[in-house]
Amino acid sequence: MALAKKGSRLITVDGTTYRWRLRGRPTYTQGLVHSPLTYAVERANDPGTTLVVTTDRAHPSNWLGTPSAPVLPSQVADTIRTALIEGWTPESPGSPFHPDRSGLGAAATE
């Protein structure tokens, strides 16, 4: 499924254009700061496998007022490059690719 264009941003990494998007409203567990912020990335013109990145920060709209740092385009670009090295194939259809950048391992996605 393709990312919604509304609210997404374009980024070009090594000559390929990607679309990335943060969820506008936090999920219930993100709102309570029980799970970290995630964002999704896909190729802009020919989406295939989506990259779903788990970060090491709280959602900026969490309900407890926990401080959060913004996700910078440079961080998104670095994550895209790393995911490509780790085997993400954005041009092929398939299940989402889930790199975990939270530092918590699999526990962060449960």
Image (cartoon, helix red, strand yellow):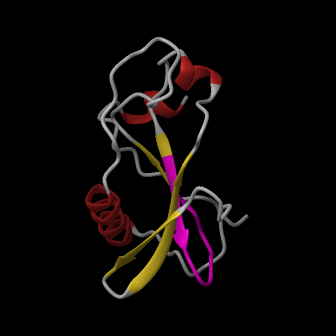
Q: Is residue 47 left or right of residue 16?
A: right
Considering only vertical position in the picture, is 80 above or below 62?
A: below
Which image quarter is the N terminus in? bottom right
**Residue 84 picture location, percent across and down:** 37, 71
Q: Residue at x 65, y 68 (%)?
A: 94
Considering only vertical position in the picture, is 75 above or below 62?
A: below
**Residue 70 picture location, percent across and down:** 33, 41
Residue farthest along the top direction in this orientation: 64
Q: Residue at x 59, y 58 (%)?
A: 96
Quarter of the image for residue 103 reads: top left
Task: Report if residue 43 lies within the magenta region.
Answer: yes
Q: Is residue 58 left or right of residue 14?
A: right
**Residue 73 picture location, percent across and down:** 32, 60
Nearest the camera: 86 or 33?
33
**Residue 29 picture location, percent across and down:** 58, 21
The count of marks equals 0
Task: Report if residue 30 lies within the magenta region.
Answer: no
Residue farthest along the bottom direction in this orientation: 15
Residue farthest along the front direction in this orientation: 6
Residue segment shown in magenta: 39-51
